[in-house]
Image (cartoon, grey):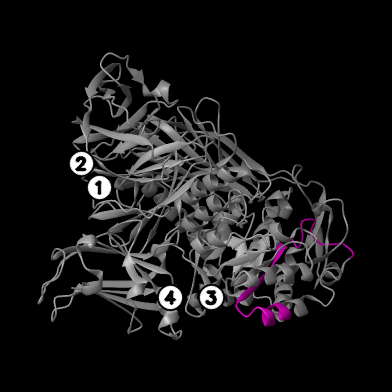
Amino acid sequence: MYASLICHPPLGQTTVVGPEKKSVRFTVLIESSAGSEKTWEVALWHNFEHVEKWTKLTLQPSAEHVAVTKASGTNVQRQYYTVDLPGRPENNNLVSYTITFRAAADEPWKWSNEAFNTSDGHLIYQSADPLANDLSYYIEELPSFLEIVREQSDTPECLLWSLIAQVQAASGTEPGHLNENLGLPTNFSRWFALTRIWSPWLAPRQGKDNFEPDKDAIIAAFERKDGSHLVVLAVSGINDVLTTFRHDGNGRVLICSQNDREQEGVVNLVAAVGKTLESAVAATMYHARKIVTRYETITGQVDAEYQALIDGFKPQWLENWYDGLSYCTWNGLGQNLTEEKIFDALDSLSKNEINISNLIIDDNWQSLTSGATQFDQGWVEFEANKAGFPRGLKATVSDIRSQHKHIKHIAVWHAIQGYWGGIAPDGKIAKEYKTVKVQIKDGVAGGQATVVAEEDVGRFYKDFYGFLSSAGIDSVKTDSQFFLDEIKHPYDRRHLIQAYQDAWNINQLRFFSAKAISCMSQTPQIIFHSQLPSNKPKVLLRNSDDFFPEVPSSHPWHIFCNAHNSIFTQYLNILPDWDMFQTSHDYAAFHGAGRCVSGGPIYITDVPGKHGIDLISQMTGNTPRGDTVILRPHTVGKSTSAYNAFDDPVLLKVTTYVGRAHTGTSVLGVFNCTKRPLAELIGLDSFPGAEKGIYVIRSHTSGQVTKATSVEKTDVFVYVELPERGWEILSAYPLQSFKLGREQPAEGPEDISVTNLGILEKMTGAAAIINSDSYIERSSGRLRIWTSLKVLGTYGVYISDLKQRSIEDDFFAVLFGRPIPSHCVKASKADENVLEIDLTRAWKETDQKASWSNEVAVELVIR
């Protein structure tokens, strides 16, 4: 007989129990063959009383309310069982548990761990005691050479320390080094680190017991058994010092610093302990920003022109750059790029009514020398190569703008050093600007490269971006920035790493008003010098390694890696760019859902004629003026479970948010990154920002909405069952309750609860809401729901007891003050409590015109 079992809190994962909770409710779902007469028995086994003593608790049948999404089939029977584990443990904050079950009293018990290839679940009961003030309580064997200073944390319920050490000076071609133990983290169950997977990119690593990342880490976190979190951060880029963490093989954290100056350098570390990982990471990042800002102020690195450019900047200049749909040529058109291929791609998009706002002309438009690899090719001159762009860059750009009016911004790609192989020694650029030959580390490229010298790099960037601007280019994608860290010798590193960053930063602001993408730039010196300071406009930052369309195993890792990198990069002065992807790919929807919850831009790189029209429609919407825009949430999307490893058989959850705190919508992207089907019961406690108030949860893929619930109730779940490369987006909407004041009889109860769902067919439809207001009109007692939206589409409102109300008699809707035809208003087929209003059809039938604001104003009146 077929049977599956799902537990909440989940097996195989760790759940933190807050200090205010007096018990933990366990809910088990058993799914079995339909028509079965079996009466299941279910038991919870736990070591609550003592770590070596396991005790049994029997679960009872329950009528939990569960919305089902992506179920394996309808020919199944679902039964729910619950039990409360009361109290809090006296001697052990870490409690393990598992589930046993059987189909009848005369059958043997089965252990869920063995039956379903899972493992024990764990509860960490968070201590209510104040955090210990001594860093040695959290890290043993702290070395005497460290200067440890207690600092004031900018996040509540956090302790913060700065740790300072000295690193020897560079000598000749050898940098100075410090390789010493930081110490041994204590009493932790799991760790998480962001590592330099290779020079340009960060990637997550997780483990248990011993700290042993396989790559150099820049930040490490430890989940302690008392429910607190220790975070240590290595700060780089100050006085040419680069610092990372390694391990000694026995769990100790090693400090590894490199100094490129010929004077003794300073190693800067930050440590924090908080009740949540989020607060501890925030504390370290905020303090690191203070350290960097203090250093840059003292050294006078923000000059008068740069400050004037920052002061004159207007955020609205970036509206289309951030929120317009973009097309990049890289994967779609290949490396033999020509203007003809670009025109064909744009014509294909237009033919399919895909109105992009931004075009990125990627690698291979430049004039280059020949070479066996890209690292053997050098950049000759500013003008585009004559084989692919015979009329020059300006003519190509001019034709694009005249033939495709919806394109607002056109960017070109270039490497920070010019091209992958640097500057062609005999080319026009080398003749105009002073160049130097630098030695490159062995590994990625090796050998020597010619680059513009420190003295001329500012003029070089000013002239190059001036040329681009005169050709009609108004944005850039600057790649290969890790090249600066690949320079080998200390003299060249200290003269070029910061000089190139500063030249790029001021000129992309001067010419392109921060419409720039920083790529392959997750190197520590760039992160802390260019990306952490918040005294300038945000740029787009590539958040992980590339989208590789031909490598199937790369796609789940891509989403996982970006979601975990964002735990750190959310505190940088950037918007995370999860890279381009193709909408007709096997993993297209998986990638699309990831981009929608990322909080960053969306780029597509489709082969001409191969477009996922339905997917693009779910990711974007059309404004009254016909622009295609993405619906970007208001916060950076990040993993909710930093300590879960990529190989763990658990669903990845990515959280983001739309609106104001406690009144907005909490959005949760759910992804199966494993090679087997996975299922989970997801409750409101999985939605950050929904801790207070009454909510309903809506599934994007099924359209189902749960009954009203709160975090305290733990009686409502969404059952998410996902196959390999499966995904779901869930949104938790806050309910508002009113009492209708009726002058005339009407159907349905006077008490009513409502919430604004935004545009229903979109993955992040709540992000379509610009403003909304719901109130009872004093004069009539009617409920008015006024909403301003970014795009047209099917507008949805959750209304309690909708099926008891008369849509024809008791509802009235207007669009820009004009009545919406009644056939455009109906109850949803997916959920009986959702009212749907077809604004696209109403817009056409009421002969509307776009206003100056380009927003959609709709009002719903209920009596």
The type of residue carrying mark 1 is: Val
Mark 1 sits on what residue? 711
**What residue span does the magenta drawing correspond to?**
398-426
Labels 3 and 2: the sequence-earlier one: 2
First along the sequence among labels 2 and 1: 2
As shown in the figure, which amino acid type bears the numbered disc 3?
Answer: Asp
Vertical placement of residue 350 versus 239, above or below: below
Tell me the mark number nearer the camera, choosing from 4 and 1.
4
Q: Which of marks 1 and 3 is nearer the N terminus?
A: 3
The numbered mark at residue 604 is none
Other residues around mark 3 within 10 Å, as few (<14) / some (14–19) / many (≥20): many
Report the Cα–Cα distance between label 1 and label 3.
39 Å
**Element at badge 1?**
loop
Asked which secondary structure carries label 2, the reply is: loop
Residue at 39 percent across and 33 percent down: it is 13
Image label count: 4
Observer-nearest of 307 and 862:
862
Question: For the residue marked with disc 4, what is the amino acid?
Answer: Arg
Residue 633 x %, y %: 43, 62
Quadrant in the picture for residue 35: top left
Where's residue 763, x and y in %? 45, 58
Does residue 520 appear to the left or right of 299 in the view shown? right
From the image, tell me which residue sits under label 3.
627
Q: Residue under label 2, please give it.
A: 20
Between 97 and 353, the one nearer to me in the picture: 353
Q: What residue would you read off at disc 4?
A: 841
Q: Count neighbours of disc 4 (C-alpha within 10 A) and say few if under 14, some if 14 to 19, many if 20 or more.
A: some
Is residue 417 rendered magenta in the image?
yes
